[in-house]
Amino acid sequence: MSNRSLAQTLAVQTQLHMSGTVGRLLQQIRDLEQLAPLFVEAGLVKPIERPNPLNINVVGIATRSAVQKTLGGFLYASAAVSLELMIQDNAVSTKGQDSLCELDDIDFVNQSKRLALIQIRQAYQMAEQRLLSGESLDLILMDCPLFLGRDMAPLKDAPEHAEYRTAYEQTLSVIEQFWQNHKEKLYPWNVAGPILAGIASEKFGAILYVAKQDLRTDQGMEQLLSSEGIDQQAAGDILSHLRGLSSIGEQRFINGILSSFTRTAAFRMSQKQTRLEPKLAAENGLVGFHFKGGNSTGIRLVQLAGDEPEWQANALDKLCGQLMCLMAVGGQKAYPLPIQLAEQELKQLDQFVKYYKSNIQSALKSREVEDIWLSDLDGEF
């Protein structure tokens, strides 16, 4: 039996693997240095001009859930906050906010997915309230996807999945009703209406997947919007670097090709309609693009319902420029300013669930709830 401590083992492994790791990273950097100019030349990455001054009315909707263990199970609270900003000549002022919350007990089965479904449902409910208010808006930004991927669907009919199936069906119903009732109020179907966008930090591999197609063919171009004006010959040259494309991780890749104040070409996220739910709402189409707002800000994915010919590259450029202005503050994890401010309100949710838990435990210990129930029976005998 050897007598080697963990520190000694780590030291040995460092010496053995450091040169290989450094070599791979340097090769990926060289690949990115070759690929980034090709993406710009092909039009797959494009610079964006920001409006100055910025004049816009925008609502940001942020969602969050918090969980506490209680009596061998869990309590949860899920909340959404909408906050409206008015920006005139770059001067920012708040116009108001609204919120909603639900709390209950929850089991562990599909807990994270179930909470995500509740948050999406609440985001849509807040968006509907804003539309029904009749206020003049330019943008409604949600921190969640617009439609549900098939990975969110319940996989089993077993009894333990019943609550998750209920949450899934409730969320589908809210999304479907929203698009049935409000589609014609929103851009691009109503050119004077507000844009509803989902903002997320995910699916970094989408543009990477597109670039691996032969964009010199019609089939390869199917996922890209034609109004983006892609240079098909230059895009096809990217295939000569396929080995480099395949060796670079998705997040490192998107960070390597996107510099400050640029966005990717818009791509159809709804290429396969059966993968998005609810189906009737998703048939409107779903367009997405990634953008980077500045040196210190992270990369975000924008999701927009619709397709060509309603969505055109110039409208996407305008929207992206506005979003970049709204990303002026914050770090790598920052969202547009109205969502950031709404997120600040949600920070109290963790403490609230702890307080709710302590109240429940106190009530259970004192049997106060049971006494209240039994008191109602006194007059019946």
Image (tube, grey):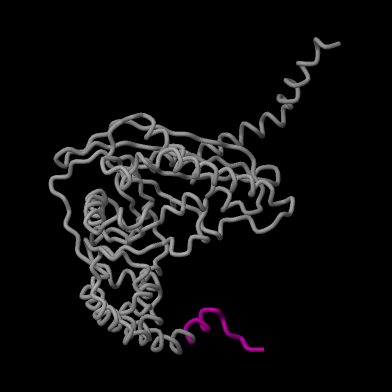
Residue in front for this viewpoint, 318 or 291:
318
User: Magenta region: which residues?
Assistant: 1-12
Q: Does 4 appear above or below 122?
A: below
Residue in front for this viewpoint, 340 or 244:
244
Q: Does 95 appear above or below 110?
A: above
Residue 106 at x, y percent in the picture: 64, 44
Q: Residue farthest to the right?
A: 381
Q: Residue at x 40, y 82 (%)?
A: 247
Residue in front for this viewpoint, 61 or 268:
268
Q: In which quarter of the image is the N terminus?
A: bottom right
Q: In which quarter of the image is the C terminus?
A: top right
Residue 122 at x, y percent in the picture: 48, 40
- Displayed quadrant of residue 371: top right
Q: How many labels does the image show?
A: 0
- Displayed quadrant of residue 313: bottom left
Is 188 in the magenta?
no
Q: Which residue is drawn at 38% across and 69% down?
A: 251
Residue 346 at x, y percent in the picture: 43, 40
In the displayed structure image, the side of residue 127 where residue 169 appears, left or right? right
Q: Does 118 appear above or below 9?
A: above
- Displayed quadrant of residue 377: top right
Is 8 in the magenta?
yes
Residue 306 at x, y percent in the picture: 37, 53
